[in-house]
Image: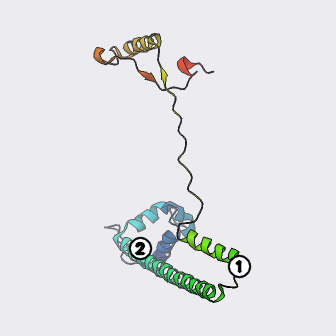
Amino acid sequence: MSRETGQIKSVSWWHERLSDWLLTNPDKFIYEAAPVFAVSAQWLYIITSSDVFRSYHQARSREVTEKIQDSVSGLAEKTAALAELSIDIITDRLHKSRSVMPVSEVTDIADMAMKRLGMGGAKAPGAPAVNVTLNMVDAGTLAEARAKMVEAHGRPALDAAAQAPLLELTPTGERNGTAG
């Protein structure tokens, strides 16, 4: 490490292990690696802030991401091929055995196919019920509230033209701090 710049000069095996630890523990903070590597958190911050380490870690991250994507895409291709082969076998059996296959089996196969296509599953739940209760505020309560606003703020809450009766949006029985 260069004392003048606070940068590491090259990546060592230790830095590679640190990069791998960071990639395999994305839910952890850098300081949590300190006891694993028997160094201080400050040292880890110095290392991970260096240009050389950052460059290596970004390249390693891209490499790991590409391997995962290749693996997942290969798995997706195999799964698609498996599904296609299974459908071909079921279709072939339906064609060959349609006269001897029980209607219940044909119905089960049709239901399964329709569900997979999104056309035969359980119905989507309905919209949730929303209940809104509106209570009118009586003139006395409104006048009392306006007086408290003037007392608290030194001015009316609304100008005189806008002081029409307002709606109260509190549930019935909870007005003025009383319940019931």
Which quarter of the picture shows residue 5? bottom left
Q: Looking at the image, which residue is at 41% across and 20% down? A: 166
How many angstroms separate mark 2 from mark 1 (CA)? 61 Å
Q: Nearer the viewer, residue 157 or 17?
A: 157
The secondary structure type at the circle numbered 1 is: loop
**Quarter of the image with the C terminus in it:** top right
Q: Which disc is residue 37 wearing?
A: none
Mark drawn on residue 102: 1
Q: Which residue is mark 2?
A: 57
Q: Residue at x 46, y 10 (%)?
A: 140
Q: Position of residue 22 (x, y in %)?
A: 49, 69
Q: Position of residue 3 (x, y in %)?
A: 35, 68
Where 77 falls versus 171 (above or below)?
A: below
- Give the quarter of the figure containing the N terminus: bottom left
Check disc 2 and give the amino acid type.
Answer: His
Q: Residue at x 50, y 66 (%)?
A: 26
User: Horizontal placement of 10 versus 41: left or right?
Assistant: left
